[in-house]
Amino acid sequence: MTELPKSAFGRLDWCRLDFDSLREVVHEGKDRLHRLHAPLEEAIRELTLKLEDLPTDDDSALWRDSVIETESPVLEDLLGIAFTIAQTQIKAVESGVRRLSKLLCRERQRSIPNLNEILMRGRTLPNEIHEIEFANAVANFWKHSAEWDWEVWKWYEERPEAQGATDGKIAARTAKTLRGSGMQSGSTGQMQTLATFFGILDFRDLSPLRTAVDGWGWGLVREIDREFGLDQATSAHLPVGG
């Protein structure tokens, strides 16, 4: 049986226990995302083959356009689901970090720095937005696009004093984050545009999204360990309270 981590004073080190829990969430996350993304990738693969097999002659143009019009929204939804699944892992890690920070504040009178910038770690995209912040915004866009008209987003963004409603704040933040991605209001294929901008060049392979989320999570784990020395392999018997 694995011995639970203890402080130099012989009592359980809850900070290290919580850190271990966070590390486990990150460790299991990539495999979980892969398992959940796999059926989406297969569905996208089948859809892509269906569209590639459409006849290209002029006589079939109307039928071909009809099929594309019917199937394109399906592809949009499959990509939206992929980003939303990734968002669940992002939120699991973010919640774990915030919980650990509260525990560190209570037990060691220190908290994790820059807590409000958890999503702003790692690689940045061409619009200078961090990729995890962007992925989170893409998921929000897909989930709420039917109720968030682009002009409403713009209205909230240009009138900070009117951002009292929670939905308005999220909509404005989402619009600001996705700006510069090439997505146009009212255009078709918006999720495809966003996914491509993120770096998913082949929609049948969602691994760039999984890799980004996994790298971000481990980056946070390493950052927290450097700051607080919570990894049992390198921080045995640290006293609680400083």
Image (spheres, rainbow, N blue to C red):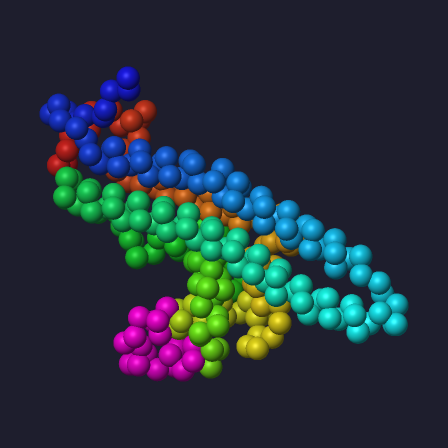
Q: Is residue 104 above or below residue 51?
A: above
Q: Which residue is pictured at 67% across the width and 67% down the height?
A: 70
> In which quadrant is the C terminus drawn?
top left
Q: Which residue is pictured at 30% across the width and 75% down the height?
A: 165
Residue 11 location (% of width, % of height): 13, 26
- For residue 189, side relative to residue 120 (left or right): right
Q: Outermost residue toward the top?
A: 1
Q: Is residue 154 magenta?
A: yes
Q: Is residue 235 above or below residue 73?
A: above
The residue stretch that appears in magenta? 152-170
- For residue 46, side relative to residue 156 (left or right): right
Q: Which residue is pictured at 19% across the width and 31% down the height?
A: 13
Determine if residue 32 is in view. yes
> In which quadrant is the N terminus drawn?
top left
Residue 203 location (% of width, % of height): 64, 53
Residue 25 location (% of width, % of height): 37, 39
Residue 75 location (% of width, % of height): 62, 60
Determine if residue 197 is in view. no
